[in-house]
């Protein structure tokens, strides 16, 4: 068989895969932009925008020299040196006084992470119910602070079907199933 795509390797260890509940971590700076507002670390608990789920926010601060913290305002995956490699870039609101090789401490905004994680889990639940019960597939999603959307491959969905899906999703949530 033909290989259609290969998973990308990350030069930044994705600590959020090891422990989704991690909110504080230590890492080493691998790269720093000239203006000090973009950092690549050897590991991160900050989730990068992916799969419809927005990036984490929080702060990074130097571990040793007592410098000021900088707010993490965006986290993105970018291509790295190799064809299949990516790096996670932390965009900061202000320059962080660190250099490659320096240790930093990260603190993830847990409220934002928990909100978007719950939205993401709910989206998967609704998408599965729409697909299983009505053959309607999810074509896109948007998670936001004020509202979220789920777009289906249908021109319209009746109020009855929407109510049925809401009731079914709420019944499954009430079962308190384990989510992995």
Image: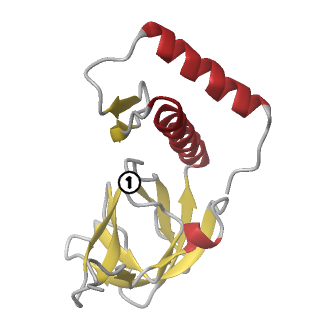
Other-residue count near label 1 (Cα within 10 Å), few / some / many at <14 / 14–19 / ≥20: few
Residue for point 34% across, 80% down? 8
Image location (x, y in percent) of residue 99: 36, 84
Image location (x, y in percent) of residue 12: 43, 80
Query: Total of numbered circles in the picture?
Result: 1
Asked if residue 39 is positioned above or below residue 125 in the image, the reply reads below
Residue extending furthest toward the right = 175
Image location (x, y in percent) of residue 124: 52, 43
Foreground residue among 18 and 100: 18
Colour convention of the picture: secondary structure
Tag 1 secondary structure? loop
Asked if residue 127 is positioned above or below residue 166 in the image, the reply reads below
Foreground residue among 20 and 90: 20
Residue for point 46% across, 29% down? 134
Q: Quadrant of residue 90?
A: bottom left
Residue position for label 1: 51
91 sits to left or right of 171: left
Image location (x, y in percent) of residue 63: 55, 77
Foreground residue among 47 and 172: 172
Looking at the figure, which quarter contains the N terminus?
Answer: bottom left
Residue for point 31% across, 65% down? 95
Looking at the figure, which quarter contains the C terminus?
Answer: bottom right
Foreground residue among 81 and 133: 133
Asked if residue 159 is positioned above or below residue 141 in the image, the reply reads above
Asked if residue 27 is positioned above or below residue 170 in the image, the reply reads below
94 sits to left or right of 104: left
Residue for point 57% across, 39% down? 125
148 sits to left or right of 33: right
């Amino acid at each position: 068989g033909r290989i259609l795509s290969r998973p990308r390797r990350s030069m930044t260890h994705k600590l959020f895969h090891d422990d989704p509940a991690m909110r504080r971590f230590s890492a080493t700076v691998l790269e720093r932009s000239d203006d000090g507002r973009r950092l690549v670390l050897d590991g991160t608990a900050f989730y990068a925008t992916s799969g419809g789920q927005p990036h984490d926010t929080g702060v990074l601060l130097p571990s040793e020299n007592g410098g000021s913290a900088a707010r993490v305002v965006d986290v993105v995956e970018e291509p790295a040196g190799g064809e299949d490699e990516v790096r996670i870039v932390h965009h900061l609101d202000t320059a962080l006084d660190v250099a490659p090789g320096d240790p930093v401490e990260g603190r993830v905004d847990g409220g934002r992470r928990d909100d978007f994680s719950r939205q993401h889990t709910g989206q998967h639940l609704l998408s599965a119910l729409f697909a299983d019960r009505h053959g309607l597939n999810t074509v896109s999603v948007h998670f936001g602070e004020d509202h979220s959307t789920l777009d289906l491959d249908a021109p319209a969905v009746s109020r009855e079907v929407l109510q049925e899906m809401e009731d079914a999703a709420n019944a499954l949530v009430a079962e308190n199933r384990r989510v992995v």
